[in-house]
Image: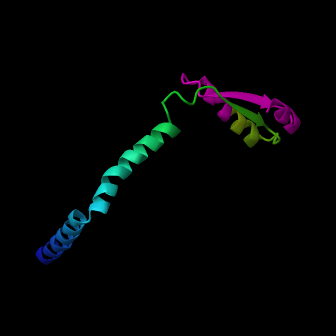
Amino acid sequence: MLNTLSDLWQIAKKDLLEFRRDHLRLITFAIMPIFMMILVGYIFPSQNSLKETPIGIVNQDTGELGVKLTDAVSDLTISDSKAFVISNYKSLDEVKEAI
């Protein structure tokens, strides 16, 4: 166990020394997290960006499973967040017209 820890320390020491000597890698190590935070900030600007997103459902399965699935998805609008506005349609043509 002690030999393993000693070997791990030698490898870590070598890698850290190499990391300190390579200035380009050091700059990249600092800039990449900042770049990713900015990028994610532009993609997801706020917690409230997904409000009242319209969703259309066409239930072509008249069986029990299709009805339960449609009801489960329709229950998403009951929550306080109102993230989705769900509309039920009878046919695909109605959905195409709504789009």
Q: Residue furthest left?
A: 2
For the N terminus, the image quarter is bottom left
Where does the image place residue 87, in percent across and percent down from the top left?
74, 28
Residue 91: x, y in percent? 86, 36
Q: Which residues are magenta?
A: 72-99
Q: Nearer the viewer, residue 97 or 73?
A: 97
Determine the image quadrant of residue 58.
top right
* Scheme of colours in the image: rainbow
Q: Residue extending furthest front?
A: 23
Residue at the location (54% across, 22% down)?
80
Front residue (pair 6, 64) = 6
96 up-or-down from 1: above or below: above
Left or right side of 94 for 47:
left
Q: Nearer the viewer, residue 50 or 78?
A: 50
Q: What residue sits 52% from the left and 27% below the top?
A: 48
* Quadrant of the frame with the C terminus: top right
Report the number of discs.
0
Q: Is residue 48 magenta?
A: no
| Residue at image location 31% in from the left, 61% down from the top | 24
Q: Residue at left 49%, top 33%? A: 45
Q: Quadrant of residue 66?
A: top right
Image position, residue 40 (x, y; %)? 47, 42
Which residue occupies the extreme top position in the image?
Answer: 80
Of the pair 15 and 85, the residue shown nearer to us: 15
Q: Is residue 91 magenta?
A: yes
Residue 20, placed above or below residue 60: below
- The image shows residue 6, relative to residue 30, as above or below, that is below
